[in-house]
Amino acid sequence: MPIVEKTEMIANAAGRIVPETVNGRPQTAYMGVGKYQPIDRKAAPFIRTAADYPANGDKRITNLETALRKCGLRDGMVISSHHHLRDGDRVALMVLEAASLIGAKDLMWFPSASFPSQKGAIPLMEAGVIDHIEGSMNGPLGDYCTQGKMRGMGVLRSHGGRWQAIQDGEVHIDIAVIAAPTADPFGNCDGSHGKSACGSLGFALADSIYADHVIVVTDNLVPFPCVPWQIQGNNVDYVVEVDSIGDPAKIVSGTTQITRSPDRLRIAEFIARFLRDAGIMRNGFSFQAGSGGIALAFVSYLKAMMKQAGVRARFVRGGSTKYLVELLEEGLTDYILDGQTFDLDGVRSIGSNPRHVATSPFTSYNYHGKGNFASMVDAVVLGATEVDTNFNANVVTHSDGRLLHGIGGWQNCLASGCTILAVPSFRDRIPVIVDEVTTLCGPGDLIDVVATERGIAINPKRQDLLDAVRGSTLSIRPIEDIKKEVERICGGRPRRPQHGDKPVAVVKWVDGTVLDTVWQIA
Amino acid sequence: MSNIVASTKLPALAGHCGLEVRSDLRVRLEPRARGGLEIQIASRVDVYYGDLIRRQAEEVLEALGVRHAMVEIRDEGALPFVIAARIEAAARRAGLGVGTRVLPDRLPLPDASARDRMRRSRLYVPGSEPKYFINAALHGSDGVILDLEDSVHPSEKDAARLLVRNALRSVDFLGCERMVRINQIPLGLDDLDEIVPESPDLILIPKVESPEQITEADRRIAEIKANYGITRSVWLMPILESALGIENAFAIANASTQIVALTIGLEDYTADLGVVKTSAGNESVYARQRVVNAARAAGAQAIDSVFGDVADLEGLRAWALNSRAVGFEGMGCVHPLQIPVIHEAFAPSAAEIERARKIVTAYDEAQENGVGVVSLGSKMIDPPVVQRALKLIARAKAMGLVS
């Protein structure tokens, strides 16, 4: 049955209005950073016995439809997939369409992220095969959700939050489908080899451990053992061989190009200089930067400064790209701890260099664990769509309320020693520094620096950073100052768009509490 | 002078729109005999600024005296000074509002620029691409050139002129010298009518071949300044771009007291000679040296051409080092990435500064002791060497290399 609900809305600790119930499940409203303390045990799948699986380890099934039937596919089940194949993925839709042929209804699709090429999920939602999506939505799927067309409510989680939700039993996966660039008949999987190689498979790890049923789909079956195994066959029920799991051209990019936009280069250079001048760039330090244009340029500026100062990092966190691989190969970092692999150089390196290590959302990001890597990173460079003068930031919606990006590891990375948002001060005529963010994704308490092409703003709560850069030639300015300048350029404060009154999705905080609501666009 | 026929009152277009366009807009204006104003607006930033865009459109049209027209605006996030310029351009192209200037609010005018200020780098910005205007000054060049000449299509000259005029009023160019490259004289004289009232710091006059062209521009500028009561200087930088221009270099450099620098355009110059422009530059050694010498003789700065290959920063560095070595004081930039490379190349080295300091110290000591002959170690220092050292220290100070 589709879940039709009327939910009460309450204000959370950040003052945002959030639903008390989402898709039939009661929620805890956000209580503040580090405030929510759950007392419970982790979820677990059923105990299985080896007697029920082939002794020769051969779990192959002829096709996906048969595998789904053997998993006991029923209406209302939760089907999960991972996004390591990014916009090139063919498997998630293949599974959902097979489920449709079987006649399943009201499924919850639980991807670790969705991509524009998966817009084929829309007709499946129209047909009632999928009730709703819990996972990042952008492009056509994001529009479908914010137009209020999805029956259930979207749930947006960080990578760490997704692990937490699975582990804590908030989301119970009935059938996990894992696209594997290489696998053996027992179900061991590796992402670094094969024609559809994507590097790490970390996003599928929780699914493999906690789902009731696990199906591996591969286009590169090798005889046992598949080495190295990132996914253990001991968690896998069935292995299905297909011609192709994805379009290699869209799985990884060739060589990622550094931006030539002078404004973006300027922001990147500012951030590198900031790390140097604040003393964060020192022997044994660590940093994380994504794969966006500014982040790549930042890495190349920082690299030059590290070389000049004779500084070596202990580790850098990926998304790995050619630029991180060069740091590793030139001895400027001891390790790459890689969550996902963006380009061909990254895939080559993770497949061959023992110091380029695949990580998972458990090791890197999970907040309900005994610590995680994210808080050990000295500095992280992130993007944002909006930031307010209290340093609260938005990363999921455009300022008109449309879903634009997933959260990814963004929320988890806020735990780093110095969180830096790299943003232009305005896009087109739209100021990025605002009075109030459209959607709250990151509490300002955790955001330390906002770097724009018009200067750098440091959160007044970080007096230590303000002190550290005293004497630097960088333009350090109060955030209100930059905001005022930009509003002058743009010809006044923008009007705040009105949203509709129907909640269409929620943004979870890293601890599973509800941080904010995404509303139907008016 | 423009390509408008005032009597026909046909619909007119100005500006650009489309998915790839940013910070611009397209205005279609159809004059009507009656019925008032009908304004349709489709904007990428409608939810934020739709009201303001409408109000601004109404104000600009009213100021232009446009009372009856159908106006369609497709806006791609243009800033207000751009919106005003595009509406004015469309109205003028439709034969309306002739003789009216609709001026956006003016920022406080920055201090006038000094005759002998540093001009190591000047960043070219195409005058018809408003998206490049707003952040042009952030990149730290000594000057920003809003270009009305080669980067602007002939059919866009009238509209670019309005954009550049509005930018001079509304855009904060920070510490950059505000330069405008007008079109070749005589077309460039019409540019002056729009530009000079906004007190640009410096006008680049392209393709100058004779001192008379400078005189003509000089006279027009003086007239406009008088009309508007402007007393501050509008400096001139002639660009020599032909064999004839090079031959007349000294006469041109001496043609006006407002000339502060002389520069050379190598694309056109090499085309005039019928030779290939190379990155080694052997084909233009004479012309460049002639410019240096003529400028020096006339008491002006000698400024080099641009280095066109943005990707080749090493080539640029080599070119700029050579430029400085042969007597140029700066060069043009076609991309902000070139600015730091040029500044570095035109900066005196630490060893040069150190040697100049020693010479100056020795000179000071000699003065104090009333000794006529200055010596450093066993070497006698001639007066011109002292002068050069003083100049180098002053320049290093201006660049922030010494305190």
Image (cartoon, grey):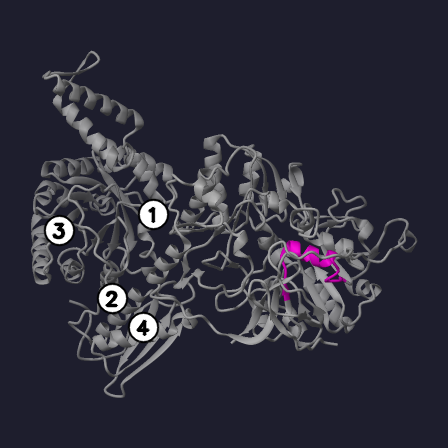
Asked which quadrant contains residue B24, the reply is bottom left
- Name the N-terminal-most of marks 1 and 4: 4
Q: Which residue is mark 2?
A: B104
Q: Mark 2 and 3 residues: CB-CB less than 8 Å, in contact?
A: no
Residue A407 in the image: state x and y as whole percent: 59, 58
Amino acid carrying label 3: it is Ser
- Name the N-terminal-most of marks 2 and 1: 2
* 1 vs 4, front mark: 1
Q: Mark 4 and 3 residues: CB-CB less than 8 Å, in contact?
A: no
Q: Which residue is mark 1?
A: B139
- Name the N-terminal-most of marks 1 and 3: 1
The stretch drawn in magenta includes residue B210:
no
Q: Residue at x 49, y 60 (%)?
A: A385
Parent chain of label 3? B
Left or right: B79 in relation to B379: right
Parent chain of label 4? B
Disc 1 residue crowd, few under 14, some 14–19, many 20+, Cα 10 Å: many
Residue A245 appearing in the image: no
Distance in Å between CA atoms under marks 2 and 3? 23 Å
Asked which quadrant contains residue A17, the reply is bottom right
Q: Which residues are magenta?
A: A155-173
Position above or below: B382 against A208 = above
Quadrant placement of the N terminus of chain A: bottom right
Q: Which residue is mark 3?
A: B233
Distance in Å between CA atoms under marks 1 and 3? 25 Å
